Image (tube, rainbow, N blue to C red):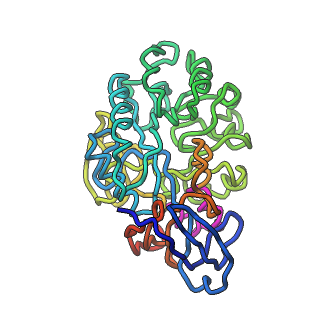
Amino acid sequence: MADASRQTLVGRAVLEDRVVGARIVVAGGQIEAIEEDDEGQNGPFLTPGFVDVHVHGWGGHDAMGNEAALDGMARALLRHGVTSFVPAAVTSPLDRLAAFADRVRQWSPAAPEDGAEPLGFNIEGPCISPEKKGAQNEAFIQLPSAVDRGALGPMLDGLRIMTVAPERDGALDLVRWLADAGVNVSLGHSNATAPEASQGYAAGARTTTHLFNAMSGVDNHRPGLAVAALTNDEVYVELVADGLHVERSVWPIVLRAKPATRLVLVSDAIGLAGTGDGRMWIGDLEVEVRNGECRLVSDGRLAGSVIALDTAVRNLVAAGVPLPLAVRAASRNPLELIGAGDRGTLAPGQRADLVELDDALSVLRVMKRGGWYPGAGPTGATA
């Protein structure tokens, strides 16, 4: 059980705009005080807990599996500094998605203390474009205009993010309906033109599913969703920073185009993440992990990642991104997207969810509500 007694942490506190030597006092599962202290310059980095709002599995466990799979996923993520997460479903029949939603809702109150805390769930599809389906199963894709709102209604409680392709028939009406219900609509798996994508954001969409992947991109004659996302300062964009989903040479474009408050690191990880090479089924499609790459067996298409957010942060920093910006993209920004304000920054009154990192930014220990749990340990500087 987590120990919520008073304790003082000494280290390099990663604040929103700088890194400072500091003493952080934790009591009752919350941060009570932070004081600058030069002694902390010799200690580990201390960051807010990471939050993954788009993750399909980890450590051999699939988010669409049973309660035991969700337990295992949560525990595996915590070791990598992820103190909160939003398990994600792939495009599936509506009855299967409804069962996933029910399962996550029923499991969440009993989620393991030594695991990442669930903050609702994410549904990637089914109202997406067949032309940009990526690794989603085309057999389950539906037109927004044909989707029964009565079937979607029972999924709304706890639904934090849902991906929609804005150019599809009925999509803008669906975006408005979901936004009015409090869902953060994410534009993605889309072949929209930039104007069509902008209409989707104007209708209420707030974020963008794995930027550049499975979407119309940057074309000087036919700009698409990626352009609309990068040029709208109000919307969030997800970045899978594994170096495979988006080449590292493109990262500076994203970082220069988007305000620091609108970049969200996600893993888009699959259940095989953290287990080495192997095969599994995702949404009735077989995928294979080989040498750190996850691809469809059928055609070799990229099909999710095998990283966690600790690797994403390390990769950004190795590419020259300041540590405070990388950490914010993995902590406060995703929380602000889904409307959770009780954690995600090192400040008095915030929940004591923290990550202790060594000089190589490997996870040494993880604090959740004031209690310590072991980290994954030294893993190197990149994926």
Quadrant of the rendered image containing residue 207: top right
Relative vertical location of residue 182 with respect to residue 169 in this rendering, above or below = below
Image quadrant holding the N terminus, namely bottom left
Relative vertical location of residue 265 with respect to residue 6 in this rendering, above or below = above
Is 279 left or right of 163, judged from the image as shown? left
Verify whether residue 322 appears in magenta.
yes
Image quadrant holding the C terminus, namely bottom left
Residue extent of the magenta highlight: 312-331
Residue situated in front as seen by the camera: 200 or 11: 11
Q: Residue at x 25, y 48 (%)?
A: 279
Relative vertical location of residue 197 with respect to residue 109 in this rendering, above or below = above
Determine if residue 229 is in view.
Answer: yes
Quadrant of the rendered image containing residue 107: top left
Q: Residue at x 41, y 50 (%)?
A: 269
Residue situated in front as seen by the camera: 144 or 191: 144
- Magenta: main secondary structure: helix
Return the x and y of residue 337 as percentages of the image width and height: 61, 43
Return the x and y of residue 260 as percentages of the image width and height: 69, 55
Return the x and y of residue 114 as percentages of the image width and height: 35, 59
Is 328 left or right of 129, judged from the image as shown? right
Is 41 left or right of 52, judged from the image as shown? right
